[in-house]
Amino acid sequence: MTAEKKINKRIKIIGCGKMASAILDAWLKKSISPQNIYVDDPKPSKWLLEKKKDGLNINTKTDVLFDYCFIGVKPQTLDEIGLKLKTLSKKNVTFVSMLAGIKINRLEAIVGKEESIVRIMPNLPAEILKGVTAFKENGMVEAEQSENLAILLEAFGETVKFVEENKFDAVTAISGSGPAYIFLIAELMTEVGINLGLTYDEAFKLVKHTIDGAGSLIVNSSLRPQKLRENVTSPGGTTHEALAVMMNKDNGLQKIFSAAIKAAAQKSKELSKA
Ligand SMILES: NC(=O)c1ccc[n+]([C@@H]2O[C@H](COP(=O)([O-])OP(=O)(O)OC[C@H]3O[C@@H](n4cnc5c(N)ncnc54)[C@H](OP(=O)(O)O)[C@@H]3O)[C@@H](O)[C@H]2O)c1
């Protein structure tokens, strides 16, 4: 469940594009006041600049101490902000990196092994407070830092804590990239609906609410997806007919999903070696 707790911590965000803005939006709605947030971004968006009048600090030079530093730049920009990160070390800051493919030891090499570092992998439904965030802490994160971090992460959805960092390639392939797979399914179902004679509006409305409803059923039911599927598939019916094609052993979705998600995990592995 998403938390409604407020916390009084000072947070720096370095790089506030799509993902960090979704996270920031959730915090401003629920857990933290804008005066406690300091954003560094070379070209702050209109949305960010709007928040300035509520007290959000953007590209300010004030010498304040932070509890958390969220890193939201692209992975290839990490070296560029290395010096800035280094100046925050030895000040009891917890560094939280959302950078895909960047391992904790790479961050430790920049800020120091004795620093508290957390690697997170959020996903875009954070925008509507329905994200799911995987996270892994290094050995230096203390209980209180960890508790407050949980509040910050739960402000935009669910969390899954990991002990093994090597699972992050799978996490990236499942939940990091996952929303795009569902968007593709929505796109394809709409297209087929149109081919079958529906208008775009008719097809898209049917598709989006079908996905929303089925997703909510998965979340709210105690049954596994396989059982839910079996429950709506009567022998010889229309669903059965479609699933026979989708579940074909040779060229069905099982094979395609397996190949596709393994390719994403492999790419994540390669990126973390680069
Ligand atoms: N988007 C997702 O669904 C998602 C999911 C999980 C993890 N992530 C991770 O989140 C991170 C950000 O992704 P994103 O999609 O939000 O990318 P993005 O929209 O490009 O955000 C990156 C931001 O960092 C800014 N920036 C560039 N150089 C900077 C610097 N030297 N100092 C401070 N800020 C700087 C960029 O400004 P300019 O645009 O002006 O360059 C931009 O506003 C990535 O590391 C990605 O791996 C993203």
Image (spheres, grey):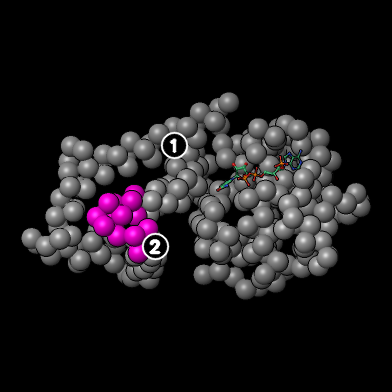
> Disc 1 designates what residue?
265
Among all residues in the image, which is located at the extreme left?
A: 236
Tell me the residue at 54%/31% (across/down): 271
- Please, what is the three-letter code of the amino acid marked with disc 1? Ala
Say whether residue 263 is visible.
yes
Among all residues in the image, which is located at the extreme top?
A: 274
Say whether residue 89 is visible.
no
In what quadrant does ligand 1 lie? top right
Query: Which mark is on residue 192?
Result: none
Say which of 240 and 157 sits in front. 240
Range covered by the magenta-colored residues = 188-202
Instruction: Give how far across and how far down residue 101 sits, in percent.
Output: 56, 36
The quarter of the picture where residue 89 lies is top right
As for residue 62 lying within the magenta part, the answer is no
Tell me the residue at 70%/35% (across/down): 78
The quarter of the picture where residue 147 lies is bottom right
> Disc 2 designates what residue?
201
Query: Element at badge 1?
Result: helix
Q: Earlier in the sequence, mark 2 or mark 1?
A: 2
Please determine whether, in this image, residue 219 is positioned above or below residue 64. below
Q: How far apart are marks 2 and 1 (CA)?
A: 35 Å
- Please, what is the three-letter code of the amino acid marked with disc 2? Asp
